[in-house]
Image (spheres, helix red, strand yellow):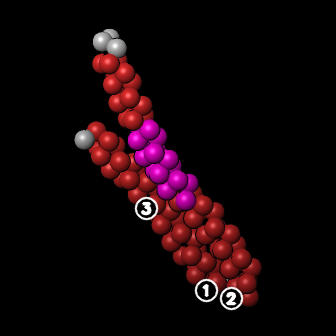
Amino acid sequence: MLLQAAKFIGAGLATIGLAGAGVGIGTVFGALVIGTSRNPSLKDELFKLAILGFALTEAIALFFINDGIFNSFCIIIFCAIERVCSSIGRALDF
């Protein structure tokens, strides 16, 4: 039961990070539209900078996903180690 709860908490924390990345990507492309409408001659340069901003923001989202997955596996491993140690303790009558 504790393992299931920990997995859901990790998934929720990863989702929070993804929501922030979604807001960041929207901000980047919103700024691209505003910049292009103010100065259309800079469209190509602004687009390059927007793609760079998109890539960096998406990298942050991937870090959050990676962190959520890593935390889930660590919790699984620690729970397995705890079960093994308690089984050994019971077998040795500690």
Q: Which residue is mark 1?
A: 37
- Which mark is nearer the camera, 3 or 1? 3
Alpha carbons under labels 2 and 1: distance apart = 6 Å
- Disc 2 + disc 1, Cβ < 8 Å: yes
Q: Which residues lie in the magenta part?
A: 62-77
Label 3: few (<14), some (14–19) or many (≥20) C-alpha neighbours in 10 Å: few
Question: Which residue was labeled with disc 3?
Answer: 19
Task: Give whichever of 21, 12 is nearer the camera.
Answer: 12
Instruction: List x then y, in percent, for residue 85.
Output: 39, 24
Q: According to the image, label 2 marks what residue?
A: 40
> In the figure, 90 relative to 15: above or below?
above
Q: In x, y percent, where is residue 63?
A: 56, 54
Q: Which of 52 and 79 lies nearest the eye of the viewer?
A: 79
Q: Secondary structure at mark 3?
A: helix
Is residue 64 visible in the rendered structure shown here? no
Q: CA distance from mark 3 to mark 1?
A: 27 Å
Magenta stretch, main secondary structure class: helix
Q: Residue at x 50, y 62 (%)?
A: 21
Q: Are marks 3 and 1 in contact (CB under 8 Å)?
A: no
Q: Secondary structure at mark 2?
A: helix
Position of residue 27 in the picture relative to residue 7 (left or right): right
* Residue 89 among those drawn in magenta: no
From the top left corner, tell me how far across and down residue 73 is, in percent. 45, 45
SS at mark 1 in the image: helix
Residue at 32% in and 11% down:
94
Point out the tag, 3 or 2, that comes first from the N-terminus. 3
Measuring 48% from the left and 66% from the top, which residue is drawn there?
Answer: 22
The amino acid type of the residue labelled 1 equals: Ser
Crowding at label 1, few (<14), some or many (≥20) Cα neighbours within 10 Å? few
